[in-house]
Image: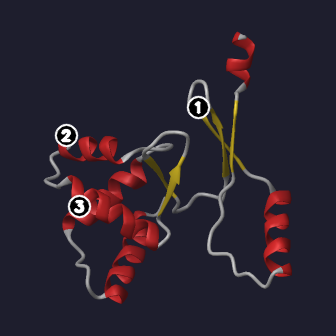
Amino acid sequence: MDTQAAHEILTKHLKSNGKQRATPERFAILDAVLQSQGHFDVEALYYRLISNGVKVSKATVYNTLEVLQECGLVSKYRFAENTSRYEKAFGRPHHHHMICLNCGDIIEFTSDRLERIQEEMANSKGFEIQSTTIQIFGTCSKCRKKV
């Protein structure tokens, strides 16, 4: 993971936007995201930041995650629950999710075939894809064995 490259992406995005400043808090949030493994919510990220001594408001975390999503460093998802979940997108391959409705496990997967189908569908309709995610809801193998 190249932290400097991620910092440069954020800096360039903030400069091009013009109305948002490059603050130490934004970069501390980016660094915390880059160190995260898997999916996280705003609460977990916020508490991790303040427990590490970063002076930041929850509103700043929300706003910065939105900025990080705009410049492609973070992905935002709404799975089965009522809150949004995030994960770092920088340096990770494009992937999709299977979500277990019983235990909440999130299983990531990639599929070249699905990527080709999406491209074919978009091309046939003259549609330019910005991003895609497929979410499959069901029961994981561990929960199915319990029945």
Say what amino acid the circle numbered 3 marks: Thr
- What distance separates the C-alpha of mark 2 from that of mark 1? 26 Å
Nearest to the eye among marks 3 and 2: give it. 3
Which residue of the protein is positioned furthest toward the top in this rendering? 147
Q: Secondary structure at mark 3?
A: helix
Q: Name the quadrant of the C terminus.
A: top right
Residue carrying label 1? 105
Q: Secondary structure at mark 2?
A: helix
* Mark 3 or 1, nearer chain start: 3
Say what amino acid the circle numbered 2 marks: Ser
Q: At which x and y percent is residue 57?
A: 17, 55
Quarter of the figure with residue 19 = bottom left
Q: Secondary structure at mark 1?
A: loop
Residue plotted at (20% across, 43% down) = 52
Within 10 angstroms of label 3, few (less than 14), some, or many (20 or more) residues?
A: some
Quarter of the figure with residue 20 = bottom left
Q: How many marks?
A: 3
- What distance separates the C-alpha of mark 3 from that of mark 1? 28 Å
Within 10 angstroms of label 1, few (less than 14), some, or many (20 or more) residues?
A: some
Residue carrying label 2? 51
* Mark 2 or 1, nearer chain start: 2
Within 10 angstroms of label 2, few (less than 14), some, or many (20 or more) residues?
A: few
Say what amino acid the circle numbered 1 marks: Asp
Q: At which x and y percent is residue 33?
A: 39, 53
Residue carrying label 3? 60
